[in-house]
Image (tube, rainbow, N blue to C red):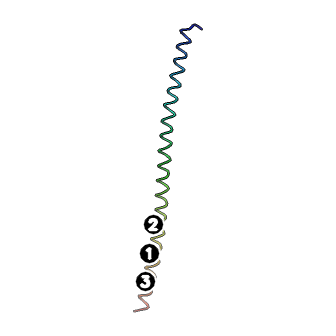
Amino acid sequence: MDSETKMMLNAILEEIGNVEERTNKRFDKIDAQLEAMQHEINACKLERESIGLLIKKIDQLETRIEELEKRIA
């Protein structure tokens, strides 16, 4: 293999390495974004569950109030 071919091959390999680095940086950013989104999703699920529990408790309290009102009347 002559020196010009070696230089071209080295330049190609170096460019492949650069592309790999840029690609890895992008994937790292995407991974960070996905992780942040997962935290938001988990927070929304927890909030939904909390609201469900509150609504259930409100229904129970309304039933108790209605029963007390019936007793008083």
Disc 3, SS: helix
Quick one: label 3, few (<14), some, or many (20+) residues within 10 Å?
A: few
Q: Which residue is mark 1?
A: 58
Q: Which residue is mark 2?
A: 51
x%, y% of residue 29?
A: 48, 40
- Under mark 3, the amino acid is Ile
Disc 1, SS: helix
As drawn, the label of residue 41 is none
Residue at 47% x, 74% y is: 57
Say which of 45 and 35 sits in front: 35
Residue at 60% x, 8% y is: 1
Mark 3 vs mark 1, CA separation in Å:
10 Å
First in sequence: mark 2 vs mark 3: 2
Mark 2 vs mark 3, CA separation in Å:
21 Å
In the orientation shown, which residue stands out farthest toward the top?
A: 2
Which quarter shows the C terminus? Answer: bottom left
x%, y% of residue 47?
A: 46, 62
Disc 2, SS: helix
Location of residue 2 (image quadrant):
top right
Say which of 66 and 45 sits in front: 45
In the orientation shown, which residue stands out farthest toward the right?
A: 1
Q: Which residue is mark 3?
A: 65
